[in-house]
Amino acid sequence: MAVINRIAGFADDMTAWRRHLHETPELGFDCHDTARFVAERLRDFGVTQIEEGIATSGVVAVIEGRGAGPCIGLRADMDALPIHETTGAVWASKRAGRMHACGHDGHTTMLLGAARYLAETRNFAGRVALIFQPAEEGPGGGQVMVEEGIMERFGIDQVYALHTLPGVPAGRFETTPGPIMAAVDTLHIEVIGQGGHGAMPHETRDPVVAAVGIVQAIQTIVSRNRNPLDDLVISVTQIHTGSVDNVIPETAYINATIRTFTPEVQQMVHRRLHEVAEGQAASYGVRAEVRIELGYPATRNDDEKTRFAAEVARDVVGDDAVIEDRPREMGAEDFSYMLEARPGSYLFLGQGEGPGLHHPGFDFNDAVAPVGASFFARLVERAQPLDPVGQEG
């Protein structure tokens, strides 16, 4: 894998940073230790414009190039997951019940590596904004950072992000123009009946039977209301009801995740969920209260910026290690909010074989960190090249 020589030269430092972050995972918006570590490293690199406390614990740092120009944004997420680690690594999590099971320690390290190189060389025009984001795993730190105005405050014109990908050859980049990850919404249904003795069901309105009927009917939305050419997933993941064997309960609870790519499909699903749940409930003589919680929107890559990002990736790893038409997937990502605010692209970076994301045995492959850092650095240099006439020696 061809990486920038200077970045390859401090690969051991990057490994040390990454393993320190892996030992000290933090959740959600509470990434204060991680943010302090990031800010300390940036100051070590000579970065002077560092703003902390954005979206509670986010950091945005700006590196000035050697000439006038626009500002490109590079984002890394910092938060971990509430999972007990089983890697057995020397650098395993020291915080029980928390671990970096999605590679955010590696993402932060790759952006720090790019920052060190860019701060040393400044071989670009304009500015680069380094976005270190908390709370990707659910709370939506990306949305909060956008709402707090980072795009306007720092004059960001375009924005990019990387995500590690196990099961794909180490150092291979994969992306696609248009939607690359789905929108995610959460369904909550309360089925309200009338409880009673299990031996006398005729005196009750059974929410258990109704809940089972609702769950089965929900799947007809996918099989009968969806255009077969549209991607859609509705997965019921929880049913809770009852407490003992001889009592028919008063209520039942149904929970599901909804994954879509277009507003039209999303709206159709929301409408049909109300109709199906409420109609099924009525047929059983019970009542259904449906609530749909909106989550991350679809992650949509800008066509032009994605082609450009793929070209930069080929500069780093060669033509054979870049996939530009990766199939989109039903996972979700809050970088979507940044891509709604500014054009850009989201890419995956293969890290080789091993446990998958969100698995207790997952660990980021330190060997690919210099590849990601080199991609970020080259992206800045190619997006905002120096004017050869006005370039300083």
Image (spheres, rainbow, N blue to C red):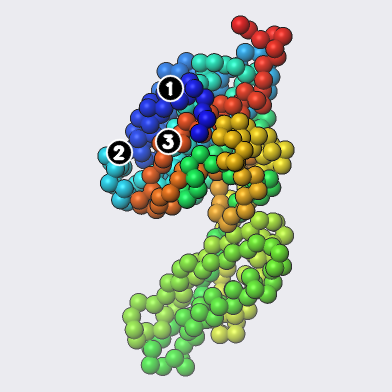
The image quarter in which residue 175 lies: top right
Q: Amino acid at mark 1?
A: Gly
**Quarter of the image with the C terminus in it:** top right
Residue 367 badge: 3
Secondary structure type for disc 2: loop
Q: Closer to us: mark 1 or mark 2?
A: 1
Q: Which residue is mark 2?
A: 91
Work out whether residue 152 can be spotted.
no
Tag 2 or tag 1, which sits nearer the N-term? Answer: 1
What's the distance in space between the residues labelled 1 and 3, CA to CA? 13 Å
The image quarter in which residue 230 lies: bottom right
Q: Nearer the viewer, residue 281 or 347?
A: 347
How packed mark 2 is, by other alpha carbons closer than 10 Å (few <14, some 14-19, many 20 or more), is: some
Residue 9 badge: 1
What's the distance in space between the residues labelled 1 and 2, CA to CA? 22 Å
347 vs 126: above or below: below
